[in-house]
Amino acid sequence: MSIRARTLIPLKGVAGDCMRRQPSSEHYLWPIAYLSGAGRRAVVTATCMAVAFCLAGCWDRTEVDDIAFVTGIGLDAAPGNQVYVTFHIAVPRALAGGGGPGGGGGSGGGTQQTTLITTLMGRSVVGVVNLMNAYVDRRPSFVHGKVIVIGEALARRGVAPYISELVRFRETRRTMFLVVAKGTAKEFMERNRPVIEQNPTKNLELLALTNRQTGLVPPSQLHRFLVEMQSLGEEPLVILAGVKEERPGGRTEQGRGGQEESTGVSQDGGEGGQDGVKDGQPKEPSKFPEPPPRPTRTDEDYTAGTSPRAGGNPVEFLGAAVFRGDRMAGEISGDEVRAVLLLRGTFKRGIAASTDPFVESRYVSYDVRLARPTQIKITRSGQSFHVQVKIMLEGEVIGTQTRVDYSNPKNLRTLEKHLAAEIKKFAQDTIKKAQTDFQADIFAFGNKARHLTTTWQQWVDLDWPEKFPRASIDVDVSVELRRTGLLFKPPAPTPRREPDGSEG
């Protein structure tokens, strides 16, 4: 144990007198020390008030009711290398009061317009913002932006200049969803007529988030696109949107302002008002969806605007737009998006139907998800590259149309092999399409090939975008069905005797 030495300092005079001579707070506040009690209080009060005025933050305030919140932006190609910019502006009073449903809202039926949709043409996206104040009485703000819709023509021309402009602007959120619309973005935003959701851009946001439950659209946000566009190891995949054209006599959703559309559909679900009669004339009943123009492999083998449906919101998200750099190279269907997500290892879950391995004309429905992350291994031999992908899925049988007992382990193993073979076929077809039609690595295999190089320059010289179309890719799929739904055995009808005496 060490003993800390204490140092004694000799003091002149009395120690107590020395202590009294130490500086006190009064010495530091000597100007106030010579003031009377009232004077001191006055100085302290004045100082506190001065500090309070300096801390006030209302000098640069912006009132909420002075701002026009832009919740959606649409971009379309314009002549002369210019751009059409469509702004989707919320009308808070109408939204809070439950105004008319859908897109541009409506003024009919005593309701207010829920949103303002306006289009301007200019040299840049942000450059036309001030011009909008020539007829919009509030200052536009992008802080609550949710979605950016790009027209197909502009997407094929190249979107890098406009994406760069948006991400540089301080008010633009990089979490905004990015969508490519068939046709024009202006038409798509104007045709959006949601019924359940009051805010049209909130409706688009919820549609974009369905990739977590269905896998029919890719995750697509502004920041993600910016990173993938500049990457040497992958290409962007953007949500594909379209408008479903309703054929005459088809049933539509509730129209603007609670009024009925031209097809005569009333708010209560009937056509032409009460008992399906309008103006004393019976209306044509609702028609079923038209069959697809070509045979499809699955129920999800469609792109936006072509799904076999009738009624509901005319706009839909289905499939994806494939980009090569900043230019759109083509589109893929909903089931091909699932294959891409499985190969990337970002698939969450989804429900699908497959042919029954025991009865060809019947189908089995199943719910699958990734059991473990997708394994990707890339090897190199000279200038040749080989990619090995292993996909491991698990799920459950949720529906059958046959009397096959899938609680029998032998039957269940047969079904698992059958599903694995079908999923492998979809994956291989999607890979072939990406290599031949698009020549774009939408699977991010290149990110796994970077370990083949040791420096950045070697990675650049490897030129993976040029090597990907010629790479050899093998896919292995395994499926494990853990449950067979709420029934152990399929229900069977009770045998009944026919009138002629035979067993039915």
Image (cartoon, rainbow, N blue to C red):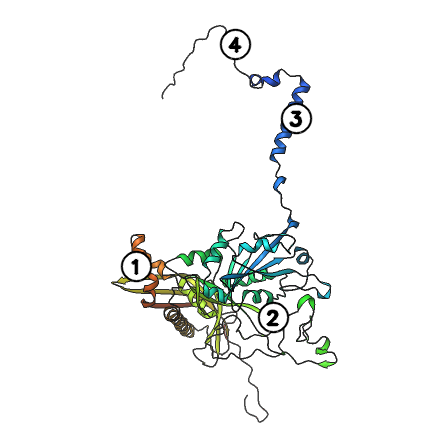
SS at badge 2: loop
Contact (CB < 8 A) between labels 2 and 1? no
Query: Is 254 in front, or is 421?
Result: 254
* Amino acid type, label 2: Gly
- Work out which residue is located at the far front of the displayed protein and give it: 80
Residue 209 at least partly seen: no
Q: CA distance from mark 3 to mark 2?
A: 67 Å
The residue carrying pointer 2 sits among few (fewer than 14), some (14 to 19) or many (20 or more) residues within 10 Å by Cα, namely some
Q: Which mark is residue 16?
A: 4
The picture places residue 217, in percent across and down from the top left corner, at 49, 65
Q: CA distance from mark 4 to mark 2?
A: 92 Å
**Residue 192's quadrant in the figure?**
bottom right
The picture places residue 382, in percent across and down from the top left corner, at 24, 63
Contact (CB < 8 A) between labels 4 and 2? no
The residue carrying pointer 3 sits among few (fewer than 14), some (14 to 19) or many (20 or more) residues within 10 Å by Cα, namely few
To which residue does mark 3 refer?
Answer: 45
The picture places residue 223, in percent across and down from the top left corner, at 47, 55
Q: Earlier in the sequence, mark 4 or mark 1?
A: 4
Q: Earlier in the sequence, mark 4 or mark 2?
A: 4
SS at badge 1: helix
The residue carrying pointer 4 sits among few (fewer than 14), some (14 to 19) or many (20 or more) residues within 10 Å by Cα, namely few
Q: CA distance from mark 2 to mark 1?
A: 49 Å
- Work out which residue is located at the far left of the displayed protein and give it: 382
**Residue 37's quadrant in the figure?**
top right
To which residue does mark 2 refer?
Answer: 312
To which residue does mark 1 refer?
Answer: 462
Contact (CB < 8 A) between labels 3 and 2? no
* Amino acid type, label 3: Thr
